[in-house]
Amino acid sequence: EKRVEIERAQREVANKVDRIITKLGIEHDSQGNRAKAYLYCLETRCPETGWMVPMAPSWVISRTHCVIAKLAPDHASRTFGIEIFTGVSADEMQAAEQGTIREGNLVYDLDDKTYRTPIKTLRGDYRDAEGNTANKLRRWGKNDFKPQHDDVFQERLYCIQWITRETLMVHRPTTFFAAISDEDLDRERKVERIIAKNLKRWQGKGLIPDMIIESGYNTDQPIRERGWMYWHQLFDPRTLLMAGLVSKIGNQAVDKFNLNTLLDNSGRLVRWHSTPPHKAGGGRDLPANVFSNQALNTLFNFASRSWWSAANVLRYEYPGGFAFSSVTQVVASSAPDASVSADLFVTDPPYADAVHYHEISEFFIAWLRKNAPLPFDKWTWDSRRDLAIKGSGDDFRRGMVEAYKAMTDHMPDNGMQCVMFTHQDSGVWSDMVSIFWASGLQVVGAWYIATETTSELKKGGYVQGTVILMLRKRPAGDRPGFKQRLLPEVKREVDAQIKQMMHLNTETAAKMGAPVFNDSDLQMAGYAAALKVLTGYTSIGGEDVTAFALRPRRKGETTVVDEIVEQAAETANSLLVPDGLDRETWAAVGGMQRFYLRMLDMETTGAAKLDNYQNFAKAFRVADYAAVMASIKPNAARLKSVTEFQSRDLTDRTEIGPTPLGALIVAIQEFLAEKDPTVVMANLRDALVDYLDKRPVLMDMADFIAAKARGPEIRRAAEAIAGRIRNQRLQ
């Protein structure tokens, strides 16, 4: 009955907001069609030509209906019109994939000439007196909610997704996309006038934030890249209006949490998401959400929901469940201050410096701190950055130990802790061993669960799951461990864990067309398996584990735990044979060869995150992975292709030069240089002392490169080399 009452009250809130929006006349056109989503882009004046140029990484709007935007130059006003076309050809769709933002530059064509200006030049980036990066963007004031006329970056509404009047009440309404008319701009200006009139008053009442953005790792990004100084500036005027109305009308706790859902699904940080019909979950055109990853990413084009669309992402109906009576208590406190005993603690701890939760929580705190409902009005609405466990190394380890020790002390002997953890750095997993040791805990179970949804931001190499660790108090008594005994035990545990996950991958791929886990997931599962073994011991090599865990680490020190965790990663990687490579070949190579072949395979999935290369370089014990990299940009990393290797890269002084893979790369280069194939094969044979033994490995690697290399000419050359090795007559 209570649930039904809450749902009824929530629907009433939604209906009230809808009546206000309808009365204002800001979502319906003159034909009675209702807006579903609004697509915006930034635009800026190019210093070279003086033209105002729209900014977007892509002009594709709908892959389902083949809708694109095209720029139409207007020489009289020195601006570009934006035209919308539906049902275009595949070639036009492909051309539209390339927008005016390319590799950090504004790029556009005008009068048969291409203009290119770095974004950092438009911002006016420079180094200040302390050596920090600064720029000349205007810092927005407390009353700003849209760009001023002389700001570097302006905003432009360029397309609206409409619902036809006839299908407004249908479960799956008919939608279409249209360019912007004068009527649309009039409605846009009306929304801006409403916000301008009410902003100060609504901020005073706490309906819209007036909280300044405090500097931090994540929170510096919107300040640096857009000049936004207050949290409300992360939202466009239309979202501010909707969120302000929900804040005003909704007085229950559930309404406020629905407000959070609205904030995550609309505003200046929301991507426009379009998937083709043939993809899993495809055939959809809609705004995505802010926290597609755990950062505050500024965008060059963004999507804002209409109220009709926003109301559909809010949860007004809750499914029924088991009825039971319980006594509940909600307490907000830091973990080291835990004062209530419990049989079970479930934690999702900070992942070293991977996610700055204490900063990004302020995205929501800014909206709730002055307008929190009962009983949350008694909470301290502050992120308490000074109390956050952050960073890595000794500080991270000490803070985590303090938190987990407090929970362990308030847990009975038969109690349990469930820890959800995700990190790709073996050093962080070594720290977790120390943390659990010093907290008096032992991992008794570890398994891997796919928890992440796939998105364009997560393509290639991002972990798709979370390690679930179950822990109990470590039993009393002494259980010494020694490296020579631990390594085989860790290897067996890792082997069992990886094989179980690979079996699940095979079953899932057969039924759904794609595996559940990628290489990064499987590598991380190896760390968890090592954790399970190590935390069962009370001493390692004669040293008490608690004392070992709490002592400060010396810079550059490699402990026995580091060695064992690295060994676990190596064991996992030895089982991760790249798709298309024989297991015998993978077992025969190591180090740099494994690194290059593994990353070449991962690049076919779109991997471009530098962290992936760094983590696999550590796992394969590669000393200088950068030697085989064409780019080490954080989000655009890639290997050198065969043709990008220089002679100095393939000498005996490098890690790859004296290997069979290095000799094979030289052979492919010679083949591409049109050297006599007979000479090429003779050189390949002479380059390797044990050529006969290495012949199967060379043949398999050549076939692998022929299947995985980016350039078609490289693939053809590798295929030709593989064929000649296969058919070579040896005397």
Image (tube, rainbow, N blue to C red):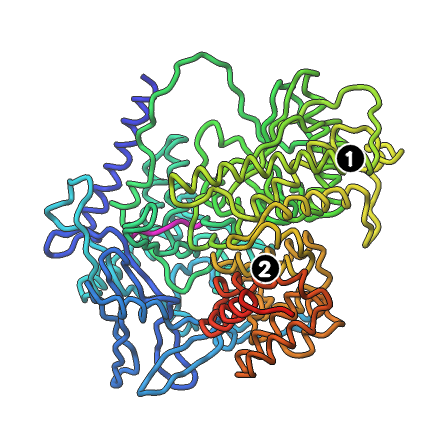
Rendering coords of residue 122 (x, y %): 48, 76
| Residue 212 in view (yes/no) | no
* Residue 697 quadrant: bottom right
Task: Using the image, tell me which numbered label, if any, was put on residue 486.
Answer: 1
Please tell me which residue lies in front, 168 or 714: 714
Residue corresponding to mark 2? 597
Rendering coords of residue 54 (x, y %): 34, 72
* Residue 548 quadrant: top right
Q: Residue at x 31, y 49 (%)?
A: 282
Rendering coords of residue 594 (x, y %): 64, 57
- With 362 as the anchor, is 201 left or right in this view? left
- With 541 as the anchor, is 255 left or right in this view? left
Give the residues drawn in magenta, as a range: 285-290
Q: Amino acid at mark 1?
A: Leu
Residue 381 to residue 50: above or below: above
User: Where, quadrant-wise, is the N terminus in this rendering?
Assistant: top left
User: Where, quadrant-wise, is the C terminus in this rendering?
Assistant: bottom right
Please tell me which residue lies in front, 41 or 632: 632
Tell me if residue 287 is in the magenta stretch. yes
Q: Residues within 10 Å of mark 1 (few under 14, many from 20)?
A: some
